[in-house]
Image (cartoon, rainbow, N blue to C red):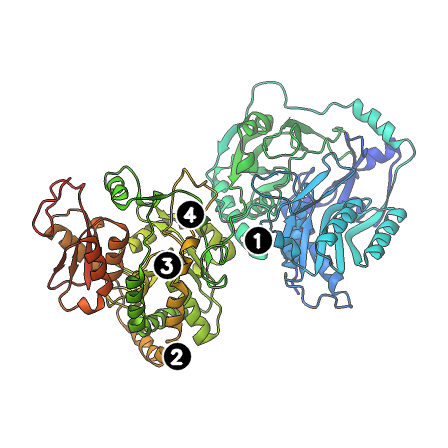
Amino acid sequence: MTRPATATCRADDAPAAVWSGRWVADRLGAQLTGDRRLSELVGLGLRRNPRRAHLLVSTVLGKHVPVDPRVVRATGLELGARVVDALDGGTRVVDALDGRDALVLGFAETATGLGHCVAEAMDAPYLHSTRRAVAGVAAAGGFEEEHSHATSHRLLPASPAFLDQGDVLVLVDDELSTGRTALNTIAALHARRPRSRYVVAALVDVRSAADRARLDGAAAELGVRVDVVALAAGELRLPNGFASRAAAVVADRVETASPDGELAGEVVRHPVRWPATTRESGRHGFRPRDVRAARHAAAMVAADLLPKLAGTDVLVLGTEELIYAPLLIATALADLGPTVRVSSTTRSPVAVIDEPGYPIRSGIRFPSSDPGADEQGERHAYNVAGARSDVIVVVDADADTPTLTSGLLAALRPHAQRVHVVPLPTWRPLPTALRGPAFGSYPAEDVGWLLTDLSEAELEAPTEEREEAIQSGGAHYAESLPIEYQPDAEYQALFRRALADSAARVAHAVGVVTELVLAERGPAPVLASLARAGTPVGVLMRRWAAYAHGVDLPHLTLSIVRGRGIDTLALRWLADRHDSADVVFVDGWTGKGAIARELAAAINIANNQLGTTFRADLAVLADPGSCVSTFGTRADFLIPSACLNSTVSGLVSRTVRNSQLLRADQFDGAKFYRALSGVDESARFIEAVVARFADVRPSVEQSWPAVRRSDRRPTWAGWRDVEQLSERHGIGDVTLVKPGVGETTRVLLRRVPWAVLIRPGAEQDLAHVLLLAERRGVPVHEQPGLAYSCVGLIHPRFTRGASGADGTVAAR
């Protein structure tokens, strides 16, 4: 059973001698009776709200009243521990609450941070409702809170399936005053996904007997069990005429705004240290591993802030629903020494009365800076007035608008020597992975495509036209597509002969590279193949792992673009669902090693930007260029998947990165060529290789340990060879020299080839290369001493002064 962490409190955290509900009780006759702890947890205030005149003001929530963050967190963890005890409670309804059996839902805006803490104590997934509309995210549910000034709650999980987790649903609010909000929520979510048990958790339960009966009746009507857990219970009695008398009191009180006079505090903005891959709130869902990531991020932010503080009297101010991340930052900062309090801005219009026994002694008001808020207008921060050394405003990027500076920050400047702004990246739901048969011809379980479907876009251009645009610098090769090669019967027959001849050799290489990955990155690596040549290899590696070890490895495929790096959004997707350290990048083969270098540079940048720990190791079937350390072989042999394009790669095109077609929140794109299904060889290739697994397994088991013990350090011999070839043939550009069977095939299928160089004696393995060269009228020259079986040269028609492979000078 998971137990909550503990927190230490200082002596000055004891409740004040004067109860913060005394003023309302004495003047308006309100009575709060119940457990001894009740008055320690809440005071009584007056709302500026015609729906409900009173307000229970928590002294431990860190919302309206600044509190030591360690007290806030410890209280939330305590409530979570009470929920765990209630679920175990002798009946063993939940045998082992480990996060798979419960879902925690917190209510916006006041209880979002409290819900986080309860979920943390339970090690359970968490979602909080929101009053922010998020573009592109459809609500998976919602409910109403009748008494609130802002009634509508949205549920915006990253995936609708998030709401279907858990045999038990735990609803968390700061107070349970009538239970109507809980009832509305249970009814809405029970209609979506029925459960037999619900728990309503709150700091205090002050329902009347009628309210308790109403909840019990509703539970019986639904046929469910609803338990209520609270740290203190009692009852609030309001005399007749309370609402009108309270309204009169409120009308006579004017909320204080920023003092007149010159603004004093210096506003200091801090660079973002919170990784973009770390969720800043539970608006779209929060999992136990997100808690660990958030605590680590908060510790980094706190360590950065400490030497920049003007003093040791610090208020960390969250913004509306953003409470948990500021709480973690405040807790980490308090552990470093300063005196820290935490609270949050709010929508709640509360009467400010600066008298003993009243909880809201000061207030500032300012305009909302959240463009996604369903209700614009004024926002408030209470009990923040007075001189402090530092106020730290923690805000997510969406709400970090110019209005924040002219509103909240300007209102805070008179109250601190320094006002610090700590913006956190706004985490948004990531696109879903595409899967067959909707996209691609591979079975859904074999691969998820981290790509955007551009099947309807017009992207193809004649090969010569594309080559001219690419070499002249007018376009990047990844902005368009070549016209997809459609093999005729003769070429398909050649492919099938090549497959029959080499299937066992491919299977052996698959086995060796997969065993190396499992031994060095196991036991459960995540395969991330580089689309599209790496995709069939990733499918085969996944199949070998299942065949030889009975393990089901996740396999995703993503885009990398030479000269522009890897798809960072796809990396975020991988890091969001897996430990980034477990991800293994996969490709078909290496030529001169350009993609290996591109991957290394891109991963270094991504890890710094995202706070991830991806490794830039590349696993390939064949490494003739000696560019990587994880490979099945270093021989340059025919991998039949190199013979074709989409028709051996799940009918998916090469990837596209084109800003005119793709938004920043979309993966790189590709096309699904459904029309080519009649000539699709993707399944034939996979099954032919898999059929040889049993034949090669003994040799794989014998050879892979020897490969592992060998010196596998890259020598980059292929890159040196390419440089020499470029110089020998007067090309002057290594990007136009494509070494190896796979790269030569690509040149012949989708570039403008100039010549093909082959090693004497290699013709028997190059039938498809020779056929393609003949059809395109490309000269083939033997080159003694060639390190590769063959090399394709792209026509350097746009390179001044380039001499041809046959001694001629290329025309510009």
Q: Which mark is residue 291?
A: 1
**Residue underneath mark 4:** 669
Q: Position of residue 275 (x, y in %)?
A: 48, 47
Q: Which tag is nearer the camera, tag 3 or tag 2?
A: 3
Q: Camera-side residue: 428 or 777?
A: 777
Q: Which tag is nearer the camera, tag 2 or tag 1?
A: 2
Q: Is residue 9 visible?
A: no
Query: Circle 3 sits in a helix, a strand or a loop, which is it?
Result: helix
Which quarter of the rendered picture does the C terminus lie within? Answer: top left
Above or below for 320 versus 541: above
Question: Which amino acid type corresponds to the residue marked 1 in the rendered image?
Answer: Val
- Categorize mark 1 by other alpha carbons within 10 Å: few (<14), some (14-19), many (20+): many
Question: Rounded to the nearest whole Å, what is the CA distance between mark 4 and mark 3?
Answer: 18 Å
Question: Rounded to the nearest whole Å, what is the CA distance between mark 3 and mark 2?
Answer: 26 Å
Question: Which amino acid type corresponds to the residue marked 2 in the rendered image?
Answer: Ala
**Residue underneath mark 2:** 694
